[in-house]
Image (cartoon, helix red, strand yellow):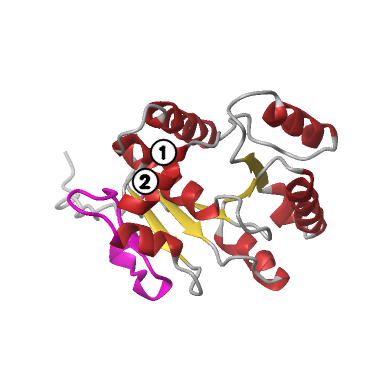
Amino acid sequence: MPDFGPAPARRPVCYAPPMPRVIAITSEKGGVGKSTLAVHLAGAFHERGQATVLVDEDGRVGSSLRWAARADGPGLGFPVVAPDDVKPKKLAAAVAVLIDTEGRPKRKELRRLSERADLILVPSGVSALELDATRELLDFLLEAGDVGRQSRVVLTRVPPVGHAGEDARENLRDEGLTVCNTLVRQYAAYQKAAELGVLARDVRDPRAGVAWTDILSLSRELR
């Protein structure tokens, strides 16, 4: 048989690590539970085994960072960082990166979100004023093209009794807006969690489990 010489050395195959999914949570209306949603959604992804990092970009208030700083003991279980502390090493193993955006961001900042985020969540309460503000924001996002196509409304602080949440959800859908099916109902467990620097599941409250179930349901709907 002919001698073709030694076989060529095999080059090692390099695989780039998958990029984490980036979810931004933003609103132009205060008091809709933006940071509460960001902290708890990050906690839900973490509980489900997805390495998660929460970035607090609200430099004026820093609710998520303050929340994490109050923790005593195990705390939240996932890192909460300021934008200046976001390093490639911290994101290398992350499956999900959540951004708690600045409160009432400027419109140009909202446009830039489309370049950074795979999904933009807009939390909204169910009152007429909150829903009007949400409609205005979603109209702007839809006019911005790509930003609107990757945006969803999530109804928060929904009264646990009655049909206000379901009615608001269906009305927004009838108007052509994309709305998460899960309703995040209003429970005192969230406020207690913020005071202690933990998640709602970790506080002593008769409704803590129900509150956490809402968040887990939302996390599964998103991924």
Image location of residue 93, percent across then percent down: 30, 53
In the image, farthest residue toward the right: 175
- The amino acid pointed to by label 1 is Ala
- The amino acid pointed to by label 2 is Ala
Left/right of residue 5 with respect to residue 75 in the rendered view: left
Any part of residue 171 in sight: yes
Tell me, yes or no, whether the highlighted magenta stretch contains residue 11: no
Tell me, yes or no, whether the highlighted magenta stretch contains residue 85: yes
Secondary structure beneath label 1: helix
Left/right of residue 61 with respect to residue 205 in the rendered view: right
Q: Which mark is residue 193?
A: 2
Q: Which mark is residue 189?
A: 1
Q: Are marks 1 and 2 in contact (CB under 8 Å)?
A: yes
Image location of residue 66, percent across then percent down: 37, 64
Range of residues picked out in magenta: 70-94
Is 7 or 81 nearer to us in this picture?
81
Is 70 or 142 nearer to us in this picture?
70
Relative to 74, residue 30 above or below: below
Relative to 139, residue 182 above or below: above
